[in-house]
Image (cartoon, rainbow, N blue to C red):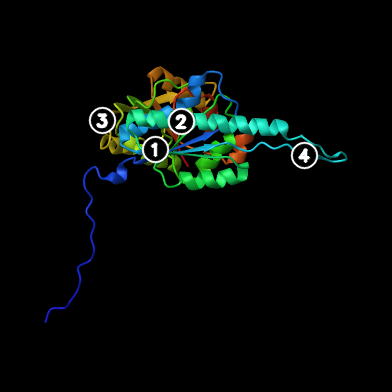
């Protein structure tokens, strides 16, 4: 008598399965900074995210954070000062108004591009905004953040919070970037580390769409370049065209070497792992990640 045994479950993976596709793009904007002097730069991140969604057939989720600015109404030795928060109320109203104006613009961009989108505005103290922002960002494939010109100032906490705590890769777009989300040339910064491998793996959907991908190693006269034969073979299975360049380190350092080459090459995207050194060390002495975030003139794809 045959045993009544159920067959073991199995899974079928199809070529080009959705597991390697981008289907949810998250956009995070912080309205703590004053608006850019060029009004077009206010919408750089929104336009980029919408274009990326249109190219990937993805949904856009946007989180617009308007942190509450508050001046204590009680000063030691002086007691309560009536009307002391009036300037703070004005700042908060301006931040909220700019967020609402940006939401309208993003929804208009999405409608024109036939992209589905939901845009949330939240105004609260920074600690609560961080919690809501991370909860909103985590169920996504990729996070898009606009990098203002004064990165070292107010937006750095937002960028680092998302990078270190969201569990998702981020795509940082300079405020002055005018070429949109097109992806003809991509550069991969490769040092053979686990961080670089993670970044390449997370970026495969974008790298596969690029016209050509160039793997960059940076080495000095006293150090050999990281092995790349395996990486090139791997990327060749995904990408249309793959090449390699080993660059000597410029006197200004690795970050300057990467930035200059990416600009001369005409790259639309730079893929790299984030923070080889502890964050506290990078804060005080600098590092490739910090230097790239401050000075890069093209979108950077980062994984941690």
| Horizontal arrangement in the rendering, residue 39 relative to residue 284 (left or right) | left
Depth order, front residue of 48/281: 48
**CA–CA distance between discs 3 and 4?**
61 Å
The residue at 22%/54% (across/down) is: 12
SS of the residue at dot 2? helix
Residue under pointer 3:
240
The x, y position of residue 207, in whole percent, is 33, 33
Where is residue 3 drawn, in percent x and y? 16, 78
Q: Mark 2 = which residue?
A: 104
Along the viewing direction, whichever of 267 and 167 lies nearer the viewer: 167
Q: CA distance from mark 3 to mark 1?
A: 30 Å
Q: Which residue is mark 1?
A: 117
Residue on which the image places disc 4: 73
Residue drawn at (31%, 29%) of the image: 210
Labelled pair 1, 2 in contact (Cβ < 8 Å): no
Q: Residue furthest left?
A: 1
Disc 3 residue crowd, few under 14, some 14–19, many 20+, Cα 10 Å: some
> At numbered mark 4, what does the secondary structure look like: helix, strand or loop?
loop
Query: Would you say the residues marked 1 and 4 are in contact, meaning their CB atoms lie under 8 Å apart?
Result: no
- Earlier in the chain: of badge 3 and badge 4, it is 4
């Amino acid at each position: 008598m045959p045993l009544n045994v159920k067959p073991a479950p199995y899974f079928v993976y199809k070529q080009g399965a959705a597991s390697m596709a981008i289907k949810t793009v998250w956009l995070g904007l912080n309205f703590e900074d004053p608006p850019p002097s060029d009004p077009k730069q206010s919408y750089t991140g929104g336009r980029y995210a919408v274009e990326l969604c249109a190219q990937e057939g993805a949904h856009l989720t946007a989180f617009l954070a308007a942190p509450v600015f508050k001046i204590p109404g009680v000063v030691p030795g002086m007691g309560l000062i009536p009307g002391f928060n009036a300037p703070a109320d004005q700042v908060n109203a301006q931040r909220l108004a700019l967020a609402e104006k940006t939401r309208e613009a993003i929804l208009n961009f999405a409608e024109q591009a036939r992209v589905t989108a939901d845009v949330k505005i939240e105004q609260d103290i920074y600690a609560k905004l961080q919690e809501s922002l991370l909860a909103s960002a985590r169920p996504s494939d990729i996070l898009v953040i606009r990098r203002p010109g004064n990165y070292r100032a107010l937006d750095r906490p937002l960028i680092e919070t998302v990078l270190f705590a969201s569990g998702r890769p981020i795509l940082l777009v300079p405020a002055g970037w005018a070429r949109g989300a097109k992806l003809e040339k991509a550069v991969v910064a490769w040092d053979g580390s686990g961080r670089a491998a993670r970044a390449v793996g997370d970026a495969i959907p974008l790298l596969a769409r690029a016209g050509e991908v160039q793997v960059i190693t940076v080495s000095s006269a006293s150090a050999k370049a990281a092995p790349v034969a395996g990486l090139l073979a791997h990327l060749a299975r995904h990408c249309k065209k793959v090449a390699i360049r080993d660059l000597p380190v410029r006197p200004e350092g690795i970050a300057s070497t990467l930035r200059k080459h990416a600009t001369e090459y005409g790259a639309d995207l730079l893929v790299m792992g984030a923070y080889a050194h502890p964050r506290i060390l990078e804060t005080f002495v600098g590092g490739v990640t910090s230097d790239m975030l401050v000075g890069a003139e093209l979108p950077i794809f980062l994984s941690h």
